[in-house]
């Protein structure tokens, strides 16, 4: 399965042609949601293009890591 489909990027980003390096990371943050503090996972996909420039490919917020 192509990485763009795995990340849910669809046709918005052409990874194979212009992004040879992709970093995936996650950070847990505390967010006030509906009057209570909850821990949520923020996922980040960062690409490095052929010109050695960083590109933000996507940012997602989930209930917890793995969700």
Image (cartoon, helix red, strand yellow):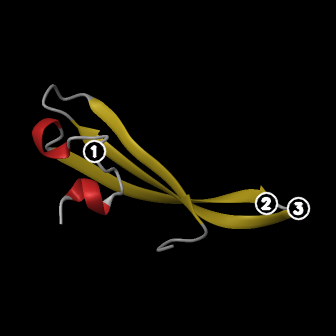
**In the picture provided, is 19 more to the left or to the right than 8?**
left
Task: State how many labels appear.
Answer: 3
Q: Residue at x 13, y 43 (%)?
A: 20
| Image-quadrant location for residue 17 | top left
Residue under circle 3?
35
Q: Which mark is residue 11?
A: 1
Q: Residue at x 29, y 62 (%)?
A: 6
Q: Residue at x 13, y 45 (%)?
A: 16
Q: Position of residue 13 (x, y in %)?
A: 27, 41
Could you tell me which secondary element the residue under label 1 belongs to?
loop
CA gap, disc 1 to disc 3? 37 Å
Q: Position of residue 22 (x, y in %)?
A: 24, 49
Q: Which mark is residue 33?
A: 2
User: Crowding near pointer 1: few (<14 within 10 Å), some, many (20+)?
Assistant: few
Looking at the image, tell me whether mark 1 or mark 3 is earlier in sequence order.
Answer: 1
Residue at the extreme bottom: 66
In the image, residue 12 sits, relative to residue 65, either above or below, namely above
Q: Position of residue 41 (x, y in %)?
A: 55, 63
**In the picture provided, is 38 more to the left or to the right than 34?**
left
Q: Which mark is residue 48?
A: none
Could you tell me which secondary element the residue under label 3 belongs to?
loop
Q: Position of residue 11 (x, y in %)?
A: 27, 45
**In the picture provided, is 3 more to the left or to the right than 27?**
left
């Amino acid at each position: 399965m192509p990485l763009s489909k795995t990340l849910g990027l669809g046709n918005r980003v052409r990874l194979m042609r212009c992004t040879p390096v992709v970093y995936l990371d996650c950070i847990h943050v505390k967010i006030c949601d509906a009057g209570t503090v909850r821990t949520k996972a923020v996922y980040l996909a960062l690409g490095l293009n052929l010109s050695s420039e960083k590109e933000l490919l996507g940012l997602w917020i989930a209930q917890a890591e793995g969700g």
